[in-house]
Image (tube, grey):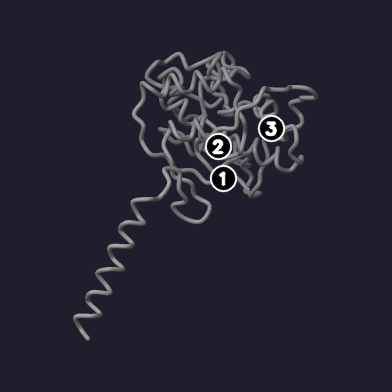
Amino acid sequence: MRLHIRSTVLTLAAAITALAGTVAPASAASVGTVTTTLHEAIAALPVAAEDRTGYERIAFKHWVDADTDGCNTRAEVLLAEAIEPPTVTGRCTISGGIWHSYYDDTDVQGARSLDIDHMVPLAEAWDSGASTWSAQKRQDYANDLGDTRSLAAVSARENRSKADQDPNQWLPSNPGAHCRYIEEWTVVKSRWGLSADPGEVTTLTDLADSCHDARITYTPAR
């Protein structure tokens, strides 16, 4: 009997091991969490032409204070990304502090010299599917604190140079930032179910060929 049980356990273990080797490259590591690689994530993006018909920036309400703690989304990102913490007084008034703008590899003193960049700009999101969303979902997108890659504190100069352009049209001035940038761009588009136009996909794919194809994880937005 003991020999039979041991044989059954070993057979089950072998079956589990075999099944583990057949898990798809982009898999659910836990409920709602997707694990994939940069190349696979780019290949999985829906491809569609962009359409900016009807776009207005006010369609994406920001910056809001979702948790009513006195600090709006902009302030929350500044506090989270500071490399030298600022002083916070009153109703979340921020002074001092130092931030690293990875787009141009520059340390920035003082929050007034920073913009909070939507990794995928609001206009680009509209072009790529957000035009069909509810006002609430667009607000959630514009204030997404659920993934640190959605919003970035960067120098105002870089953010304004980027404007609403995609990676086919604009990349950070720091070449060393390109792999991180396209990974974060792809994660945000994947997280929110946004499409990419053909030129964008070509550029992302070409750039990814020179990047380490590490595994990445994100949680799709609800």
- In screen coordinates, is 212 left or right of 44? left
Q: Relative to 120, is 160 above or below?
A: above
C-alpha gap between disc 2 and disc 1: 7 Å
Where residue 117 appears, as percent x and y from the top left, is 57, 27
Question: In what element is the residue under mark 2?
Answer: helix
Q: Relative to 18, is 179 above or below?
A: above
C-alpha gap between disc 1 and disc 3: 15 Å
Determine crowd level at label 1: few under 14, some 14-19, many 20+ residues with C-alpha closer than 10 A: some
- Residue 190 is tagged as 2
Which amino acid, mark 2? Answer: Ser
Question: In what element is the residue under mark 3?
Answer: loop
- In screen coordinates, is 127 left or right of 182? right
- Residue 220 is tagged as 1
Q: Are marks 2 and 1 in contact (CB under 8 Å)?
A: yes
For the residue pair 78 and 198, the one nearer the viewer reads as 198
Which amino acid, mark 1? Answer: Pro
Q: Relative to 174, is 60 above or below?
A: below
User: Extreme bottom residue here?
Assistant: 1
Question: In what element is the residue under mark 1?
Answer: loop
The quarter of the picture where residue 129 lies is top right
Which amino acid, mark 3? Answer: Gly
Determine crowd level at label 3: few under 14, some 14-19, many 20+ residues with C-alpha closer than 10 A: some
Where residue 35 appears, as percent x and y from the top left, is 44, 45
Q: Earlier in the sequence, mark 1 or mark 3?
A: 3
User: Extreme right residue here?
Assistant: 54
Q: Which residue is at 30% across, 58% downward?
A: 17
Q: Which residue corresponds to mark 3?
A: 129
Q: Earlier in the sequence, mark 3 or mark 2?
A: 3
